[in-house]
């Protein structure tokens, strides 16, 4: 018997007519709710009553129950099925077999090459753009405000700091996607300018490529990090090769924007762990480009060493698509995290990435909600992420 049928029978047997009423109201709610509800106070009416398998996030276990969201978009109650109490005049969504859990945060995207609206509708409630011209970054950035309708929370790094004529200034980053820094003094000036433009973090590129592009010197990396930290910002480094990872660590960066693709020696893996540096996954795009195996091996070694892996897709690159990517989750699961650990990496851990605000990756009573309603349990069927039933964040409900 399917999980959905078992839960349906549980409701009918335990709750009798009340259970039948909830199932019917859930079906009615899914039929009637459509599009995006507007964002002013009270737009959610008396609130939303969600029913299904509830995962609060973190190390909590899922349970069959309910989540009640009030008209402000704040979690009023989470309760197991046995404690069910159905308020009157409230929209009911979900039912047997549905999954209710935190929305995903993608810690590495490029919104200039992917749709923010499609990210949100696909279950991604927060994104971190790691490379954009200043004007676009200012336009997208959420900061301390509520996101614009139809958009996820968006943190931005602004232009990528690099050596003059370095990556990505001669490839995809020609149009002000990169900011050259040729000396320690210039590095400090550029960091101050990017910070004044409202960046949530700083990104530096240490990428020689196959043709030997210039890369920032160790002294410049240290100057960038010192200036960023003085401005209260973290530094994330694009560093795929062993010597560039060492340079990033020597300079004191806070995070790696990708899992490195050159096989890391054990001593370097241990050093990353000891420094407490997080690593963003971006594994699927490497597999799509044919270089995923060594990156996956590095991710496994990093996880075993205790490094915190965060979910990120590098949206805009080969093999990526807006919304949650079940393939990236499975790549993370294969590192040893398992599917529950991969989901935690995509919610709580990614929500803790430098620059992210307004997102915790958890469902907590009394806090604003950023959740998804899926038609099936993603731990059993990750493909459920490809078609979320609803997304509720920032006081808005999107029914897809």
Image (cartoon, rainbow, N blue to C red):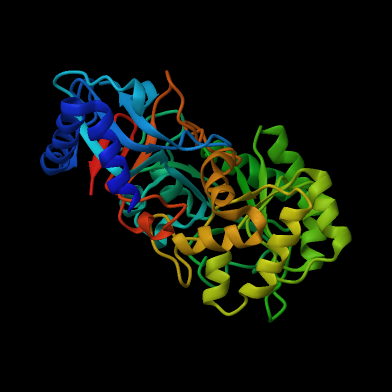
For image coordinates 34% across by 56% down, the residue present is 115
In the visual, does 78 lie left or right of 233? left
> From what the image shows, is residue 243 above or below residue 379?
below
Q: Residue 178 falls in which quadrant of the image?
A: bottom right
x%, y% of residue 14?
Answer: 28, 28
Q: Residue 385 falls in which quadrant of the image?
A: bottom left
For image coordinates 44% across by 55% down, the residue present is 380
- Furthest toward the front, the residue is 13
x%, y% of residue 285?
Answer: 53, 69
> From what the image shows, is residue 391 above or below residue 71?
below
Q: Is residue 204 visible?
A: no
Q: Residue 77 falls in which quadrant of the image?
A: top left
In the visual, does 352 lie left or right of 71? right
Number of numbered callouts drawn? 0
- Furthest toward the right, the residue is 267
> From what the image shows, is residue 328 above or below residue 36?
below
| Front in this rendered view, residue 358 or 113 | 358
For image coordinates 21% across by 18% down, the residue present is 87
Q: Is residue 19 visible?
A: yes
| Front in this rendered view, residue 196 or 132 | 132
């Amino acid at each position: 018997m399917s999980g959905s049928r078992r839960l349906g029978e549980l409701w009918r047997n335990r709750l009798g007519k009340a259970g039948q009423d909830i199932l019917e109201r859930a079906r009615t709610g899914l039929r009637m709710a459509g599009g995006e509800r507007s964002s002013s106070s009270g737009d959610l009416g008396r609130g939303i009553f969600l029913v299904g398998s509830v995962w609060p996030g973190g190390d909590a276990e899922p349970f069959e129950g309910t989540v009640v969201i009030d008209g402000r978009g704040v979690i009023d109650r989470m309760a197991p099925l046995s404690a069910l109490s159905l308020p009157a005049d409230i929209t009911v969504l979900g039912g047997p077999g549905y999954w209710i859990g935190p929305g995903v945060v993608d810690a590495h995207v490029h919104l200039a090459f992917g749709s923010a609206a499609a990210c949100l509708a696909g279950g991604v409630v927060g994104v971190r753009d790691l490379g954009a011209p200043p004007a676009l970054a200012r336009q997208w950035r959420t900061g301390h405000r509520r996101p614009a309708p139809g958009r996820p929370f968006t943190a931005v790094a602004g232009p990528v700091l690099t050596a003059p004529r370095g990556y990505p200034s001669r490839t995809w980053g020609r149009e002000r996607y990169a900011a050259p820094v040729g000396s320690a003094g210039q590095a400090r000036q550029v960091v101050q300018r990017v910070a004044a433009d409202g960046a949530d973090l700083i990104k530096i590129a240490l990428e020689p490529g196959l043709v030997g592009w210039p890369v920032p010197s160790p002294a410049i990396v240290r100057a960038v990090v010192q200036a960023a930290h003085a401005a209260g910002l973290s530094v994330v480094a694009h560093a795929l090769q062993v010597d560039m990872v060492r340079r990033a660590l020597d300079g004191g960066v806070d995070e790696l924007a990708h899992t490195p693709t050159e096989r890391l020696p054990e001593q370097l893996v241990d050093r990353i762990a000891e420094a407490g540096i997080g690593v963003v996954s971006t594994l699927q795009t490497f597999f799509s480009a044919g270089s995923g195996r060594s990156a996956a091996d590095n991710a496994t070694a990093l996880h075993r060493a205790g490094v915190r892996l965060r979910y990120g897709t590098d949206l805009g690159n080969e093999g990526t698509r807006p919304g949650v990517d079940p393939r990236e989750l499975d790549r993370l699961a294969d590192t040893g995290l398992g599917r529950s650990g991969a989901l935690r990496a995509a919610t709580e851990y990614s929500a803790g990435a430098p620059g992210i605000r307004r997102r915790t990756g958890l469902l907590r009573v009394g806090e604003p909600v950023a959740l998804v309603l899926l038609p099936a349990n993603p731990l059993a069927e990750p493909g459920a992420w490809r078609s979320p039933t609803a997304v509720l964040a920032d006081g808005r409900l999107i029914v897809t």
